[in-house]
Image: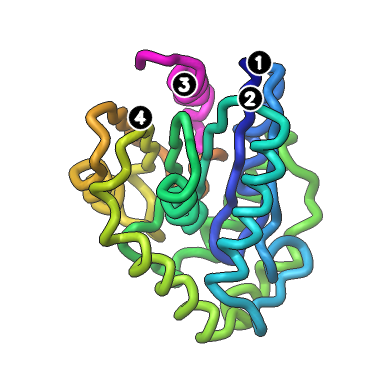
Amino acid sequence: MKTGVLFIHGFTGGTYEVQPLITFVKKHTDWSVEVPTLPGHGVTLNLSNVSAESWMMEAELAMRRLQKKVDRVIIVGFSMGGLIALYLTLRYPVSRLVLLSAAAKYISPRFLLEDVREMLRESITKKYTPNTFRHLYDYKLTHTPLRAMFEFLRIVKMVEPYYSQIKIPVCLVQGEKDEIVPFSSAEHLYKNLGSENKFFIKSSVGKHHICYSDDCHDWFPKVLDFMRSDTY
């Protein structure tokens, strides 16, 4: 049985946000991987003319591409990408769901720039990503249109009524030092998701960009075990 993983990045971010976990999965498996860049995101960040529908459609197109190549699909969603992952799980057959710092409650943009800058410093040391994104973050927040924030909040509201309909196995990973998405967001999801098979990984040192946490070497293997297992 061929397995594929769809990785979905977060609001105002890009694929680099989940790259360390992508690298880990590729190193330890022969699985197919799809990693779309949502409209307006990535290196050429421009959120002036985007919508919640355009983000969800891009993720759906990636889902369909992956379905054509594999028999079993796993979705990994980071931050807003976690909400889009929930949306896709309601519409498509998904084997397992991994939610990283899922933004089920709110984003606190006041701390975003500082957290991303630290993530970039760490990425240079760990050699996860090249230093090609630094220029984005000097103006990232002030150049994020209010309309784009409302589009993000629309996704939050669209998905929330259907948490109880998510029945597949779910793994949540949340940093206790996340100042962008509160720890209570993951607790809220864990309580309200309809799955009877739920696994909650708590990172005592993790901030919002959880894939760059100092303890990722501890929880990456746990997430991969969850993704591999049919009975976890």
For label 4, the residue is 169
Alpha carbon separation for disc pair 2 and 3: 14 Å
For label 3, the residue is 218
Q: Quadrant of the C terminus?
A: top left
For label 2, the residue is 25
For residue 113, above or below residue 188: below
Three-letter amino acid code of the residue under disc 2: Val
Three-letter amino acid code of the residue under disc 3: Asp
Disc on the earlier residue, 4 or 3: 4
Mark 1 near mark 4, Cβ–Cβ under 8 Å?
A: no
Point out residue 97 in the picture as x, y percentages from the top left corner.
44, 36
Segment colored magenta: 213-232
Point out residue 149 in the picture as x, y percentages from the top left corner.
48, 77
For label 1, the residue is 28
Left or right: 179 as drawn, with respect to 63? left
Mark 1 near mark 2, Cβ–Cβ under 8 Å?
A: yes
Q: Residue at x 80, y 55 (%)?
A: 132
Is residue 208 visible in the rendered image? The answer is no
